[in-house]
Image (cartoon, rainbow, N blue to C red):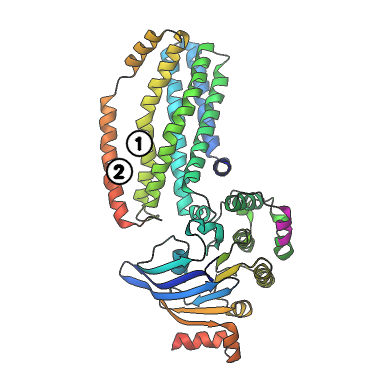
């Protein structure tokens, strides 16, 4: 890979009807980085994700990928905010089918074992997804998003619907995948404490503009807590 | 190819799960049983032909109706986004839907053929000969039909717009209207020509006889095609391509 970034947004603007949702945002994600994306409801987080996934086109500005644009979804995977599933499938079928779509190879058993060690999903796999609880649906969605260990994994509100022990398991899972497989993560979430523990860098979006883009270690050196910082930036 | 087959398998699971297929199978059984009694009673080949041709058309409409529904559901439930971000290409998606329609239609036709077999060997052969044509016909029609429905879905101004939903369903019926006439002509021609397979002149005569164009149907289709063209232009302006 010639570029030192996986994703780069340069002065991206997006307008819906007459309302400007994104006002020239710029940031990059480097290989191996875990980036937290925070902001109030309606700040433009999901619009950013949709732009990265090419569901929308920017009005102005550029989005560049550190890999071939044509192979976008071989290098990038996504957990949507809502649980979007073909819920008529069993969990096993769902994971098998979508792993095949992404990689064109069958899903190996050892990968199921790997995820089972975090989420205990094996017992649920033969059952149909529509019979799952909200938390279980979230877990199977997360496994599906992470499974091919893409270069860049985008998780939109991954902690939503998860009980505390599953949230802890997810934190461990993301760290392990990041270290073991070198995947980068772009995580949009409202759970600041989890992001604080997990992320290498934080991007704060306010009314379509980036107010903060800093490394967590720099914030820690300055003794700043994400919660206080969020309050300060939000009121300021 | 394997991706498309997997997608078709997914659709089959969805259909079985939502009882749609069972409704179609029940209708088929009902009509065949009805045809049995009718034929046994009056020995009227025209009635029998009419009933079974109606059945064929009904299955075609039902399946395109289901296909329109499936494309619509993929969009409204976000499954299409999930497929797209899972590296499924548009052509694989359309081919998957086409396979589904072809498989189910063939299975239904085979079922009807087997049911008819004890009653009348001629009719059985007639229906079995349809299988061959159907394969060709469905690939020819279902692929562009799905592409058309997909294009409509892509350019929809608003996913929750009930008018658009209506147009999707209406579109599938329109496509069926457009094609069923042609299909019936070809199938009938083939069945008539089957016993005279080597008589080229006879085949030609039959083709000319049954290949006549229904001008009202053409006019109807042209009007609908124009309406769709205007609608697509409108939708194109409203929504960006995904």
Is residue B210 within the magenta segment? no
The crowding category of the residue bearing disc 2, from other C-alpha atoms within 10 Å (few below 14, some 14 to 19, many at least 20), is: some
Q: Which x, y percent locates residue B120?
A: 53, 12
For the point 42% across and 28% down, the residue is B57
Q: Which x, y percent locates residue A110?
A: 74, 56
Q: Which x, y percent locates residue A67?
A: 52, 62
Report the front residue among A19 and A219: A219
Image-quadrant location for residue A220: bottom right
Quadrant containing the N terminus of chain B in the rendered view: top right
Q: Which x, y percent locates residue A82?
A: 53, 62
Q: Which residues are magenta?
A: A107-114
Tell me the number on the disc at residue B118.
none
Is residue A108 within the magenta segment? yes
Tell me the number on the disc at residue B174.
1
Q: Is residue B125 visible?
A: yes
Q: Chain of mark 2?
A: B
Q: Which element carries disc 2, helix, strand or loop?
A: helix
Quadrant containing the C terminus of chain B in the rendered view: bottom left
Q: Chain of mark 1?
A: B
Report the front residue among A28 and B14: A28
For the point 66% across and 67% down, the residue is A177
Determine whether label 2 and label 1 are within 8 Å by CB.
yes
């Amino acid at each position: 890979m010639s570029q030192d970034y996986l994703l780069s947004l340069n002065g991206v603007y997006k307008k819906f009807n007459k309302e400007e949702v994104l006002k020239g945002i710029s940031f990059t994600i480097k290989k191996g980085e875990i980036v937290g994306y925070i902001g109030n409801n309606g700040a433009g987080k999901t619009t950013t994700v949709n732009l990265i996934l090419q569901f929308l086109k920017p009005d102005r500005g550029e989005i560049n990928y550190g890999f071939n644009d044509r192979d976008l979804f071989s290098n990038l995977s996504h957990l949507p905010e809502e649980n979007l599933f073909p819920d008529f499938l069993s969990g096993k079928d769902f994971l098998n089918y979508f792993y095949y779509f992404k990689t064109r190879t069958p899903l190996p058993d050892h990968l199921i074992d790997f995820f089972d060690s975090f989420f205990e999903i094996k017992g649920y796999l033969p059952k149909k997804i529509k019979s799952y609880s909200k938390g279980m649906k979230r877990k199977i969605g997360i496994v599906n998003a992470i499974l091919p260990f893409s270069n860049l994994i985008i998780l939109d509100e991954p902690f939503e619907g998860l009980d505390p022990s599953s949230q802890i398991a997810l934190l461990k899972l993301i760290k392990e995948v990041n270290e073991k497989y070198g995947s980068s993560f772009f995580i949009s979430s409202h759970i600041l404490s989890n992001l604080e523990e997990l992320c290498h860098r934080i991007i704060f979006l306010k009314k379509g503009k980036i107010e903060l883009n800093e490394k967590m270690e720099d914030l820690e050196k300055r003794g700043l807590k994400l919660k206080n910082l969020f309050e300060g930036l939000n009121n300021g | 190819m394997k991706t498309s087959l997997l997608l078709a398998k997914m659709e089959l699971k969805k259909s079985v799960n939502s009882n749609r297929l069972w409704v179609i199978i029940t209708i088929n059984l009902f009509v065949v049983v009805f045809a049995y009694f009718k034929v046994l009673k009056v020995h009227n080949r025209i009635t029998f032909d009419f009933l079974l041709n109606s059945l064929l058309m009904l299955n075609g409409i039902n399946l395109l109706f289901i296909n329109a529904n499936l494309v619509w559901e993929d969009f409204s439930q976000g499954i299409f986004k999930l497929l797209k971000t899972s590296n499924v290409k548009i052509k694989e998606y359309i081919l998957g839907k086409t396979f589904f329609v072809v498989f189910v239609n063939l299975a239904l036709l085979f079922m009807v053929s087997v049911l008819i077999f004890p009653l009348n060997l001629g009719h059985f052969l007639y229906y079995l000969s349809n299988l061959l044509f159907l394969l060709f016909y469905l690939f020819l029609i279902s692929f562009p039909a799905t592409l058309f429905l997909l294009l409509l879905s892509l350019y929809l101004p608003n996913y929750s717009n009930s008018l658009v939903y209506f147009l999707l369903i209406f579109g599938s019926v329109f496509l069926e209207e457009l094609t069923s006439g042609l299909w019936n002509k070809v199938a009938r021609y083939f069945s008539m020509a089957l016993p005279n397979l080597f008589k080229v002149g006879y085949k030609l005569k039959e083709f000319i006889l049954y290949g006549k164009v229904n001008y009202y149907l053409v006019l109807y289709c042209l009007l609908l095609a124009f309406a769709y063209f205007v609608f697509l232009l409108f939708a194109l302006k409203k929504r960006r391509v995904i």
